[in-house]
Image (cartoon, helix red, strand yellow):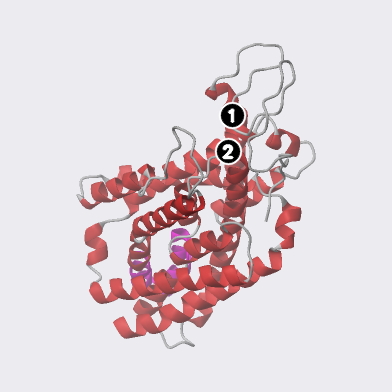
Amino acid sequence: MSTERTESPNPGRPPAKPSSGAGAPAPAGTASAPADGSPAPGPVRRNAPGLALAVVGLGLAEAVHALLPAVPMLTAAVVLGVAAAHVPGVHAFVRGRGRAGLSTAGKRLMRAGIVLLGLKLSVGDVLGLGWATVTMVLGVVLATFFGTWWLGRKLGLPGDQPLLIATGYSICGASAIGAVSGALGKDEDEDAGQLAADVATSVALVTLCGTLAIAVLPLLHHPLGLDDVQFGRWVGAGVHDVGQVVATAQTAGPAALGEAVMVKLIRVAMLAPLVAGVAVAHRRRRAHDAAGVPQPAGTKRPAVLPLFVIAFLAMTALRSTGLLPTGVLDAADTTQQLLLAMALFGLGSAVHLPSLARSGARTALLGLASWAVVASVSYPGVLLTT
């Protein structure tokens, strides 16, 4: 999939600077001096229009979820972002004045939401399930991640879609996709735009399949011979987003719900090592691609463990102390949902539907295949550990 872009007449070289008086449009998210010579707008003025639209998108996503509870708020936010990029009268704003703020939402607010996700995780609670269950979940995560990534490459999906879809299915849906995208370290305008579109596509697919799980998996509870505890663990090991896990497991009662949430949190705990692994692999790939090519002074290397992942681990450690009251945790959970919804609206606004349609069938096939992989691998794992 590709985003709309203007190719440089001489690939491999930066475009020439315009002569005095002639201006080329600045990349999204960067400041450029107005043609009349007045000072360039500061970051607040530059980002405010797009962030204001993201707030509107958040309100609309909450309204959709309130009217249709089966539609997760994060899914609604992505769809509304995509719509905003194509609705006449709005898309010009999205691609123009609003682009900087929407890009900031998709990157900065996503990372802030990931940090707060750490407050859902307690080391003691996870270890309380026992090493057999932890090992089982690790096996499910690895099989789903590498199986989905391999199949996505074989299907020829463009950009980082195979990696991002594999991450969402194996860990925790949209949150994991956002975390891995933040570790890729693509800051140039064209690379960042392509990545934002890949993220939005991956999130839409993962949330769609996770939503379908809410309706499909309860129908398989008794036909598969699972008791309530086993069903809860199966849901926790196989459904993507935490909210979708809760919605699916609660159909079998409180015992199933408790087991599902705890198993799901083990998968969330895999987020930090996975992001670190992706960052290391990306760093090595960039080093290999740049071998023999002189690098400009001041070129930054991607961090092995991004700062927001370190903050995620710090929040997990803080939650594990047991010092935070329930009110603080509830407020953090609400804030996290709001931040992620605004971020996903911003990412959705980067999607170009004609480009998406060209790989739609292959993307849908990968989603269904990955869904089958995670369900079939987790099922025997649950039977062996309960």
- Which of the 4 image quarters holds residue 191? top right
Asked whether, in this view, residue 208 is left or right of residue 373, the answer is: right
> Depth check: 327 or 265 in front?
265
Can you see residue 380?
yes
- Location of mark 1 (residue): 30
Depicted 288 relative to depicted 336: above or below: below
Say which amino acid is labelled 2. Ser
- Residue at 40% x, 69% y is 141
Q: Looking at the magenta stretch, what is its main secondary structure?
A: helix
Residue identified by numbered label 2: 103
Can you give x and y, in whole percent of width and height, for residue 320 in the image? 23, 52
Residue 41 marker:
none
* 244 falls in the magenta region: yes
Q: Identify the residue at horizontal 54%, vertical 36% (top origin).
A: 104
Image coordinates of residue 70 in percent, x first then y, are 57, 61
User: Element under label 2?
Assistant: helix
Query: Compared with residue 320, is residue 249 higher up or lower down, i.e. above or below?
Result: below
Left or right of 188 in this view: 92: right
Q: Which residues are magenta?
A: 240-261
Q: Give the residue at x 44% y 49%.
A: 183
- Tell me: 291 left or right of 83: left
